[in-house]
Amino acid sequence: MTKTSRVRLLFVYNADSGLFNAMADIGHKIFSPETYACRLCAITYGLLSEKAEWREFVSSIDAECEFLHRDEFHKREPGLAATLPAVFRVTDEGPKLCLDALALNGCSSIADLKALILGCCL
């Protein structure tokens, strides 16, 4: 009998971690949302917290999901170059790009993002 492992997805924001960066991101979303650099964050988060629809979706899919900021990702995967935001499917060989920045930046809603994940990553 073959053991099936659960799908692992790694979501990487095009934003750095930390309180100062979070405050700057909030300001950017308020004053100039059309130029905010992270579409993944813009779609899945309100000003202060993760949107309930997104949180429920992540909980409902049969995948282990991890979320990293740009600086955390580069520290953990220094040799892996990708334009962010991005979604990776993590295998025993390491992260493999599943959704690139172009695909994510084309999303205009959580529904768009969910459809991409269900169609391309799972």
Image (cartoon, rainbow, N blue to C red):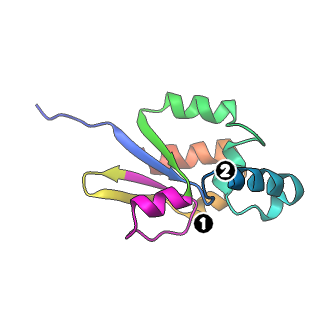
| Pick the front one: 8 or 61 | 8
In the rendered image, residue 29, in percent from the top left (x then y), is placed at 81, 53
Q: Residue at x 41, y 36 (%)?
A: 63
Mark 1–mark 2 CB contact (< 8 Å): no
Q: Which mark is residue 102?
A: 1
| Pick the front one: 7 or 94 | 94
Identify the secondary structure beneath mark 2: helix
Quadrant of the frame with the N terminus? top left
The reply to whether residue 107 is in sight is: no
In the rendered image, residue 102, in percent from the top left (x then y), is placed at 60, 66
Looking at the rendered structure, the kind of residue marked 1 is Leu
User: Above or below — where is 121 with respect to 60?
Assistant: below
Q: Which residues are magenta?
A: 70-89
Looking at the rendered structure, the kind of residue marked 2 is Cys
Residue pointed to by mark 2: 41
In the rendered image, residue 67, in percent from the top left (x then y), is placed at 51, 46
User: Above or below — where is 46 with respect to 69?
Assistant: above
Q: Taking 113 as reference, is 122 left or right?
A: left
Other-residue count near label 2 (Cα within 10 Å), few / some / many at <14 / 14–19 / ≥20: many
Quadrant of the frame with the C terminus? top left
Q: Residue furthest right?
A: 31
Q: Taking 41 as reference, is 46 left or right?
A: right
